[in-house]
Amino acid sequence: MEPLRPSDYDDGSAPERTAERPDRASGDGPTQPRLGVVGWARFLWRQLTSMRTALVLLLLLAVAAIPGSLVPQRSSNPNGVVQFRRDDPELFEILDTLQLFDTFTSVWFSAIYLLLFVSLIGCIIPRTAHHWKALRSRPPKTPARLNRLVGYREADAPTTVADALTAGEAVLRRQRYRVERYGNSLSAERGYLRETGNLVFHVALIGVLGTVGLAGGFGYNGQKVIVEGQTFVNQLTTYDSFSASRFFSDARLDPFSMRLDEFDAVFGVDETTLAPQPLDYTATVTITENGESVQRDIKVNAPIDIAGVRAYLLGNGFAPVITIRNADGQVVFDESVAFLPQDGNLTSLGIIKVPDGLPEQVGMIGFFYPSAIQLASGALTSIYPQPDNPVLTLNVFVGDLGLDDGVPRNAYALDVDELEQITGGETGVDSIILGLGQSAELPNGYGTVEFTALPRFVSIDFHHDPTQLGVLVSSVLAIAGLLVSLFVPRRRVWIAVDEAADGAGVRLQYAGLARGDDPNLDDAVERLVAEHLEAVGGTRAPDDAPAAAPASSQ
């Protein structure tokens, strides 16, 4: 709301300001009022709903989100959280106490989020009411002394007062001003769209916060390793890892399936280091939805959309097919096992667990080398990520694998503390070494193990984010509102018409006033003068010159 100015009164006088001084008897000072509970509540509410507080909270929210990008989050990278705990358990306990692994659902982040939400709403509601009232109100009366305002000009015109006012009103309306006639003067204003844009920006910001806070509660994120030839069905029990927001339910999983038909990896060689470099990864999949199947390609930077779910290609590797038979020749294990890459040449580590069919439970730690060569030390290494000479080595352990305890176990780790190693290491028995299609005897007459086939696997991340449309719409509105609030000026202009002293024609006066900084106000007044004088056939006064611009009204 603009402050009162002496020029806002027709008679040029402002109301007197009087102040009662407290009775300062000898030794007596001013008495400070006590706010009380209601007073303090009003004070705190006004502080919370001020725009300054909203800006501070917005900055604080941005700072509070930084830990979410520095440490892995349980909602998006549960494996990274597990690895962090394994690498630095002491630091993990400290950060976990501070809820840094659940940054965006932590108590402190939620508190800032909700305070910002309340602050913006409390700030916008009274501003919207005030803006609506201002839109319906009449432009202010013409100041008594226009010569004190920006762009003051005078002119003469051979016309009547009524015709000059009618022509001036037409010009102002063509320039999209709201016009009101007060006696022999016109008061016009424009630029309320500036405040409208400002309000749209803040409402859109609330839209972003509300969409992320509410619609984000229905999202989910899941990861699945799929081997060539295998099919994934979108069910909660089929994910390798899954994290969901607070409002998620199983019924929100859309029915579809994905079959990995083929995975193709293209590698090049760095001319300087001669190290292999990945050039392209393509997973060809068949998507079946509502009884219809379609084949599509997923690349690293080209995810696909399936029934409101976006599928990303995260990783890839080899999944050797291991066939284990007991001493009687019966197959007790015949599965493809995903081996996790350990370096750029895809030297990979895998875990095999055989709970039944052998005299004891058997666990194996395997190393896979796509292009194996033997070093001078006798150790194997891979020199290229493609399977030019695939070799698999296995260290065998026997004992209780803990699979019958009812406690979830990591499929990619083997706890060997309570197991007996019977090949490799310090056992005196060499590790089992297999080429593709080869088999070997297991120690102690347990049976045989065979390296049967070598399919590829991919790791797919399925991400459902219902906030995207709402955030997009709100963001577009926020940008549009911000642009309008920055580039639409709020200004007022006046035309005053008086009878000429000699009775021949009229004397015209023009001036303007800006709400805020408006460097183009003087040009706007000049344009108004030119168009009005053209309409009434007037001429500028001989001593007409733009007045110096006083400070704009804030």
Image (cartoon, rainbow, N blue to C red):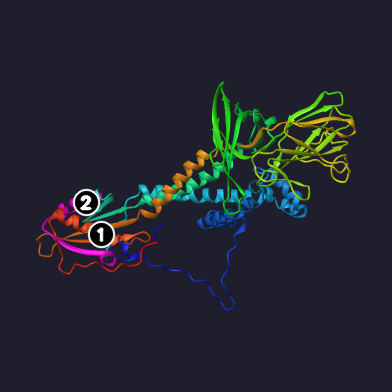
Report the magenta residues as a range. Answer: 146-173
Please name the residue that numbered disc 1 is placed on: 525
Residue 313, quarter of the rendered image: top right
Closer to the camera in the image, 159 or 368: 368
Name the residue: 18% across, 50% down: 166
Image coords of residue 546 (percent x, y): 24, 66
**Residue 124 lies within the magenta run:** no
Amino acid found under the numbered disc labelled 2:
Val
Helix, strand or loop at disc 2?
helix
Please name the residue that numbered disc 2 is placed on: 171
The vertical placement of 353 against 533, above or below, is above
Q: Residue furthest top?
A: 291
Helix, strand or loop at disc 1?
helix
Amino acid found under the numbered disc labelled 1:
Val
The vertical placement of 68 against 23, above or below, is above
Q: Residue furthest bottom?
A: 26
Name the residue: 50% across, 47% down: 205
Image coords of residue 85 (percent x, y): 75, 49
Closer to the camera in the image, 182 or 249: 249
The vertical placement of 223 against 163, above or below, is above
Crowding at mark 1 (Cα within 10 Å: few <14, some 14-19, many 20+): many
Q: Residue furthest front?
A: 376
Residue 310, quarter of the rendered image: top right
Image coords of residue 300 (percent x, y): 57, 41
